[in-house]
Image (cartoon, rainbow, N blue to C red):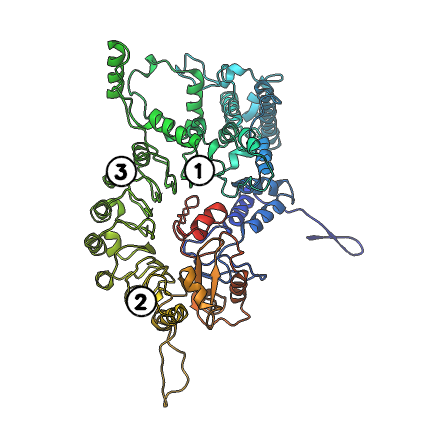
Amino acid sequence: MSTALTSTHLQPTHIEMQFPPELLYAICAHVYTSCLLPNEPSLDPLIIIQDDRIPTAHPSSVPPGYWPEPVTRRTLANLCLVNHAWYEGAKPWLWHKLEVRLPRTWLSLVEEIAWNYDEETIDTVMGKTIKAATRAALDSASALSRQGESFGLEGSFNFLDTFDAPDTTITPDLLSPIPSRDPSPRRLRPKSKSPARWKILKSINDAIQHVMNTRAPGVYVPSPKDPRPGRFVRHLDFNHFRTIGMRRSVEEGVNSRFVTGDRVQAVLKEMPNLTAFGATEYMDGALTLPVLNELFMRGAPSGGRGRPTRGRALMECHDVEEEDRERRRECKDLEAVDLTGCVSAVFVNAFTDFVNSHIIPPSDSDSSGDEDDLNRRRHRNVLYEPLLFPGLRRLGLRGVKSILPRYLGPFVLSFPNLTHLELSGTRLTPEILESLGQSPNLRLKSLALARCIKLTSESIKRFLVDSPVTSELTELNLYGDMTYVSPIQENDLVEIVTLAPCFVNGNLVYLDLSSAPINRDILAKMKPFPKLRSLGLSHILHLELKAVSDFVRDKAPNVEILTLVNTSPELDCGIRLAAMDPRSSIRQSTIALHTHVIRPLCSPPFSFSLTQGPTSPEPPPSKLRVIELSTAMLGGLGAGAGSWRIIKSKGGRGWYVDTASAWVAEQGTGQGSTLRRDLPPTHPYRIEMENLSSANGNVSSGVGWHARKMEILHGHGMLGREDGLYGAVSFAYQG
């Protein structure tokens, strides 16, 4: 808003402010990151409150530490409607993360991103792009010439007067170097039937820049505009995708699939900057071999590794395969892949073919063929280099039960720079774990080996105690239950808790030793865990509650979440131990829980003085505020006691939650973020917890505590929050 002075009065006029594109892009980047979890989350489900407060420190439950994703997406969409400049700044972040939810949404996404070669041919796209690029180059050159004349620099730009620009288009011969200058030019070959649009635009832009630098050095030429948004996508997942409830027959579900391998491949080809991909069991039939190639072979893996090192020019290589390799070489390396629950035959066969084609060296055991073929095969094995994927940092294979160990092992070992590894519920063997422990570069931050029935106690001990791979762990999940009991033996467990670097250095923030043979003596031998926030001690039948309480108070006072499902005979509720009256057994279990756990750990110590004035009470000896219990135990607790309420998940899990305790970060206190245990009944957090308790399990799949699944795509690990199918695996399922 500005004012213009007239002869009689001041008349306001509107002046549109012009901001640098970099500033608008940075503002939109901050809007997008506002929906991501902070580095130190609050461990609570997202609480949406209708006020303008923002957290002053983390962790923070109220105000919430991050925005809901729909709010962020709606904000970016509104910024796109301001003007063209804001549109250019917000569009990349609006397309940054794509979550496929509905079948029709997926089809619209394919239509928007993928290239339909029937409607728009390659020649048409090349012609339009070359014309647009040529026009932009001439506009830049003429603008520079006019600027030189306005500043009296006509002599410096006389070369523009003789600039012989093409009449309408630039000949396609200029799109690649002359063969005599470059013996192996990278160009769009005529045999290519399905090139990527972004690759064509990049080739044309490079050609235009080369021409302009040769004829008019210093002239800035803008890149050709690409109407397809595939280059902006960094994240693609099918976590929320469902076809249930569409009233489709079995035949339609088999023969008329929405998510097919061809569609996924076409979309992935137009996403050169994709870094995170998530799949589920609802679409794993589309994970064919071409799709796996598009995912894992982008970036460094297409740089020549995994093929014979010498004599490549003498080998026959199909032109289309070579073009795909060149295109993938210019893509970014994939950083995170989550394949939770993918067990279909299509995926298993494609996975097997991928490992055989790219990772396992060719076998010379096949005696078929003449002697020349055998010699050629042996020579190829000598020249073979193992294919590695150095860019991948996070890999999730939870519940991928159908992959055989001889293919699972080489696949996992081909990622030398992993920081997050989820192998729960797989056919992981001691041999694979031993090979993984011998990796020279691997340093894991988060590891999940829950319910791996083929592992042995000795292999787990050696991996945790002797291998440097696990020396920097901050999250460890060794969960077991009554069906798949932990294989760790008591003597090995003693060595693990006393000698393993991750147990000794005190850096663990998440630990789950459910169904391990833990007793009072082992807890006494453990080192302190000053950073531990979530502890799993479920399915330990003979562990006394007093031992658990002493351990949390003395060695892990910062634990906020504790799981005690089917742990301790005092919480048995008459299920395993026979009782004369089941009702009295349930009543005794509830009293034992409050007497041995809640009262000594969650209540401030009693103090009494006749001489001193009123003073602030001392804090409780621990930060415990959420306890996971069995279904029978939750039923015996009824409506809860005091501020403690029962909150059930969408599945079979449930927690006993102190609704008056939460992380609060408010302005003006000068204390940053604090864990308050005295929230009034009218506080927004307490009201939301009461609503979740009243819902009796009719809640979102993302409601819960102490996740059983590792968050892979964003890198938040075992403390991350997810919804959709991933959230159900994390918080709803019992196993």
Query: Horizontal placement of 350 versus 11: left or right?
Result: left
- Residue for badge 3: 432
- Residue for badge 2: 545
Percent of width and height locating residue 287: 45, 32
Say if 1 sits above or below 262 in the image.
below
**Residue in the image at 56% along x and 25% along y:** 157
**Picture mark count:** 3
Q: Nearer the viewer, residue 723 or 65?
A: 723
Circle 1: element type: loop
- Mark 1 or 3: in front is 3
Q: Earlier in the sequence, mark 2 or mark 3?
A: 3
Q: CA distance from mark 2 to mark 1?
A: 45 Å
Amino acid carrying label 1: it is Thr
Q: Quadrant of residue 330?
A: top left
- Mark 2 or 3: in front is 2
Q: Residue furthest right?
A: 8
Query: Horizontal placement of 376 versus 575: left or right?
Result: left
Say if 453 sits above or below 154 in the image.
below
Say if 224 sits above or below 640 in the image.
above
**Residue in the image at 58% along x and 62% along y:** 51
- Residue 227 appears anywhere in the view: no
- Residue for badge 1: 275
